[in-house]
Image: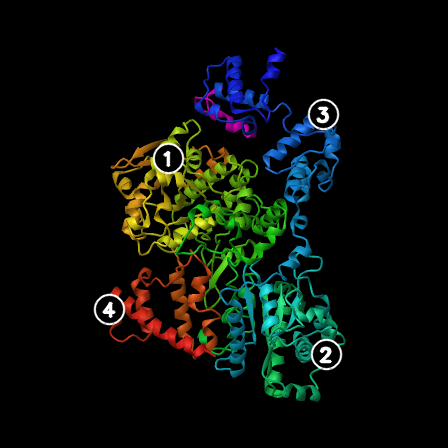
Amino acid sequence: MEAADQECTITDESTAAAVSEYLHRFVARAGVSVQLSERASKYDGFTLRLFRHDQLHFLFNGPRSDPHVQSITQSLYDALHPEGLVITEQSTAGAVRQYLLRFIRSHDVPLTLHDADSSMSGRILLGLTSDTLRLVFNERPPEEFLDALYRDLHPDAVSADLTAASAYPEPAILVEGFTEPFRDPSGCLKSIANYIRRCSASYRWQRRPFLSPYTSCVQSTLHGKSRTFRELARHYYRTVYFCFRPSGSTGYPKRTDQAINTLLKGKDAYASPGQFAKVLSYRLGQLVYRALCHLPDPVLNDNPNDPETVAEFPSETCGPQLFDGLPSTNLNGDQVQDLRRRRPEIVLFVMDEARQLLDQYVAGVDLFRCLREAVRQCDNFLNKIAAVQVSIFAVFIDTSWPIPTFSPPGPLDSSARPSSAIHDAMECTDLFQPIVLRGSFDVHFASSDGEDVDWNRLRVSDDWLKTGRAGLSLVGRLSESKSLAFLKLKLMGGGPAELKSDPGAGRLSNLALFLSRVAAMVNPNHPFASALVAGCMGTMLDTDLDRKRCLMSYMPEALVAFAAANKWHEGVGHTFADAIVPAVHDALLSGALDQGFVGELVGQVLFLFACDRACDAARKRSGSVVSVVDVLAQLLPSDTSDQLAEDAVPPGMRGAMLACGQFVNLAYKPDLRAHVRLAERHCFGVLPEGFPGWDLYGPVFLSPESVDAQGGASRDDHPMEDAPCPSERIGVLGVQVKACTDAAFSEKDKEEMLPSRALDGCFHPALLQTLDDRSVLVFMNVGSVRSSAEVTNLADGRPVLRIEGLASRCLPESVRNALRTLLECHLNYETFLSEKEAQQLARQPRDDCDDGPFDEKAVRKAWPLVIRDDRDYDSLPLGTLQRMARDFNISGDVAEMTKAELVDAIRLAKQSRDAVADAARLP
């Protein structure tokens, strides 16, 4: 008997035929009434041993809940893994060798084991460090492989070691982000430089009284705020840089101790904040003079004194000349005379990590207010007393929450002195608009040429991992384990996600883990909007004119979504169920999220779990390209045959693939350009209102074989004026979501499921007809009490996969219950922008800096998919259009004009005004 069992042992080298024979003999010996399925003969030994215990049930006919199936799958798993794949100090040399060989094959790396280690026991292997593990192999293993091997051998130690400090990249890696070539395809740097110049001039002209010559620069982490101002110092302005990052803190740039100690020297000795502000103004004036004398002139082309290979600001490298022995007295006569001989120039003072200024006080007044007053006094002295053309301007840099503090609305500012009850009449409280950093998004990602998309290349390309903010480039310089830990740390606001009992930060970080994958609208009026940007990697799109509201979104960023997915599946879904869903529930109740259609949120979650499980089964990271059939199979209940998933795919789409790592809110009807953008970013979209047939939509990659089998139509068969890519490679997957307690799939629902109906007006009619044959259709009723799955057919015979309830096999039980609880429990950029413009037009007298650093075209170009490329006046309500028409001084009775007439008149007026503005800004 032992000999027979030994002959039937499955190893990694076992062929598919040997596995099939083994399984038949295993079932015969088990003596249970369970038959093998057709898929039992398709796997070799290596593949079979990779399956988890809960994945082996598909080898047998019968529902997963059948006790006989459960019993035999457990017995089979135990037989396939006699060593348990866990190395202990008692593991034999043979077990260690088998473990290492399997680990090499599972990671697909070309490594062989060193012969000298053939007698290595478990105790010796566990004693090796992550560095000395490389000695086990003849070749030098990749760092990522060694990290993965060490984590697998020491799961408990690694889990305890990945604290906030260890997850942060090494300083040398962070410095590289400041020395690599600066990418600025949209001219962000020039826009900011011009805006600072206009603000400085407006402060001195005082067309309208401004409080102080300063503004703030705000955006989420890793967008490149500090690097952008480093480039301003290199190309536009002499810059004195201060970084107030706490001592010993991780991150870069580092705290500028010499600069800070010199500027704030003796602050605790002053009894009055006014006295300290005056001394600060003297020191700032002295620094202006020294900056002009010692810092390189950035206006000079190819300035040899400030090369791009230097990460530090010039004021850091010239620290002794600037800060040693800095007087605390005002500029003397000789210095003033020297300044009078200089050309007009702005000396920029940059205060990075500026939130720290709010926690330090002089006689009860925070340092921010002291510095703001000092900048005002310094520039007033230079302008009105010294009569020099050199000016000072300050920028406070941080993430979003300082917006209401660093650039507060007039009535809320502690320095406000109202002369009347009217907001616009506030004396000396007008503030410059903050710089919401744009132009650093997708700078490392090259979008496909709209005229010629290679869909075969797009399907296998890794370029989707380059999407997102500029600072994500540093992740490529880290091992996978460290990059994942770093991004999870950033997403969670610098700490671990907490359970619902946590009253504040835990809820926010858990909400971020949800929103970085699920498309939901965050209320711009809610404090969470700016807080998610400040601490949890949300992206700020814009603020209103009074800086009371913040429009934010989680943009398509593959690495960020992947980090969130990793947290979703921690503890077999318990983190998602016990921490993330309660945070979403609270956000809905508090008004932080637009309640809209909660069922749609649940539908997104269900689809993402299905995609993640399919990726996991294919041993790919979340968001990768996987088989459509595998994803649909994960949507099925556990006791349903996988054949149903295959039946739901039209015959001409066999072999089709899809990729979905996150959903994004589409701001407009998806055209072919949007289709390409979603495909190359591995995203699916949430369709805007007005699509009765589908709620969720995404691209499908058709295999060349399936296209050829259909006799794939060429471009000549149906020319498409608006189709910038080969139509024969385009496929779609559409999902209709409902949340009814009873089964609901009416004939009307079926009629509207067809792409030519659901996407009417999005694509060329000829392409829509083609998509009718190249579409996978899914109907989800996530609210149904009774769960089921079936393939039904439209009137013309096209299949639709109908899912009722939340019994899908991809959902752990804890997640399933949490989503049911969530089920129990419409703002867009166009309306946001129109309100902001109305505020801008009401400002009197008008000033050049009122429009901010970016025009409307730049804003729309900066954020693909979530904001339309052009203004959508048709979506605005009639009252808003009438108000806009009056603001544009359109002739005629606005109240009597139709909506179409108003739209046409506004467009013409807008074009005329933009042309005048563009001409005025030309040098």
- Pick whichever, 709 or 306, lies toward us: 709
**Dot 2: within a 10 Å radius of its alpha carbon, few (fewer than 14), some, or many (20 or more) residues?**
some
Q: What kind of element bears circle 3?
A: loop
Q: Is 52 contained in the magenta span?
A: yes
Residue under the image location 69 percent in, 83 percent down: 330
Q: Is 590 contained in the magenta span?
A: no
Number of the label disc, if any, that sits on residue 92: 3
Q: What kind of element bears circle 2?
A: loop
Q: Please report the bounds of the magenta region as a residue range.
A: 49-67
Residue 845 point in image, percent of width and height:
43, 80
**Dot 1: within a 10 Å radius of its alpha carbon, few (fewer than 14), some, or many (20 or more) residues?**
many
- Pick whichever, 516 or 784, lies toward us: 516
Residue 189 point in image, percent of width and height:
54, 68
> Left or right of 115: which side holds 848?
left
Residue under the image location 73 percent in, 68 percent down: 258
Q: Nearer the viewer, mark 3 or mark 1?
A: 3
